[in-house]
Amino acid sequence: MENGITQLSQEFSNNSFLQKLYGPNNLHLEKIENHLCVSFHTLGNQIIIRGEEKAVINAKNTLVNLYNFIETGQSIDVNDIEDIARLTENNKGRNFLNNDLVIKTKKKYIRPKTIRQAAFFDALNHKQIIVALGPAGTGKTYIAVAKAVEAKLSGEVEKIILSRPAVEAGESLGYLPGDMRDKIDPYLRPLYDSLYDMMPSNQVVNLLASGDIEIAPLAFMRGRTLSNAFIILDEAQNTTPIQMKMFLTRMGKNSKTVLTADLSQVDLPRGINSGIKDALEVLKPINEVGEITMSHKDVIRHSLVAKIISNYSTRDKKINKND
């Protein structure tokens, strides 16, 4: 070590994986170098890492995590590199990138891209009821649907039930054209889109036809007991406290329930409290319940979306403070 600079080396046993690890024209290595402020020097199947001690350790762990992913047959995209480096950097001694935090569906493997997403994955594995809060674009619904599909395909549950409260910003379903299904389907379209991204279309159609996957407005849950099912209530901020109590008490044996909500986009009429806020107080003392709160930093859509959400949040805080 000289002038605060540390040097470590990491050797990889299988040379055939190194091209995927390094990326085209060493692009993956460059991404890590820029993100962690280190430098790499490659010698055969060995990489020399130089930089400040903490950064060098993080870089080494990032390379090992990437190599382990490649070794298990998973592909690494250049856009994943900084996310994986960030997760490795922030895991505080725990490996959030292990196989327990990979969701396997028919079409793809899905893994966390931020530290909060990793916590969400972990809660989905170990809790019976999971509340995922955060702005649009943080992957709340997508990850929950992916986990539901994995549970169905593995035989862990018999059914997937996806639901939303029938409340829309500034619109009423009653004024839309067509019969009840025509009115409801566009509102539930994001749930269909997620399913088609996880499984071949013919399989989705067959499971919907057989009732093994059910997509329905929240009102259709009343009076039922939902056993052996993976149940997702999307847009849960748009429930009333009575609706939320009804939904939570539908849960039967061998079922897992996920609530997703964006507290910044409550579309209920003025003066009506959100059921998710009420539920958080009721559920908090229960050990089998996990709560994950994501922010604009967890947005995985276009980078501008995160900036827009952050600016809205800052603006709203100023307005509330002045009020």
Image (tube, rainbow, N blue to C red):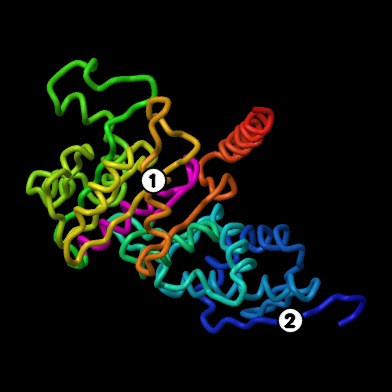
Q: In the figure, 78 relative to 162: above or below?
A: below
Picture residue at 65% right of the left edge, 31% below the top:
315
Q: Label 2's element? A: strand
Q: Label 1's element? A: helix
Q: Is the stretch drawn in magenta largely helix, strand or loop?
A: helix
**Disc sitting over residue 276 in the figure:** 1
Q: Nearer the viewer, residue 306 or 39?
A: 306
Picture quadrant where residue 62 is located: bottom right
Question: Quadrant where the N terminus lies?
Answer: bottom right
Say if mark 1 contacts mark 2, CB within 8 Å. Answer: no
- Of all residues, the one furthest to the left in this rendering is 210
Picture residue at 64% right of the left edge, 67% below the top:
89
Query: Mark 1 or mark 2, which has the lower sequence index?
Result: 2
Q: Which residues are magenta?
A: 131-153
Where residue 185 sits in the image (x, y, percent)? 22, 31
Q: Nearer the viewer, residue 113 or 73?
A: 113
Q: Is residue 135 magenta?
A: yes
Left or right placement of residue 39 versus residue 97 in this view: right
Picture residue at 54% right of the left edge, 78% below the top:
15
**Disc sitting over residue 265 in the figure:** none
**CA separation in Å, label 1 and label 2:** 49 Å
Q: Mark 2 = which residue?
A: 8
Circle 1 Cα neighbour tier, 10 Å, few/some/many (<14 / 14–19 / ≥20)? many
Where residue 106 sits in the image (x, y, percent)? 26, 57
Q: Could you tell me the amino acid type at mark 1? A: Ile
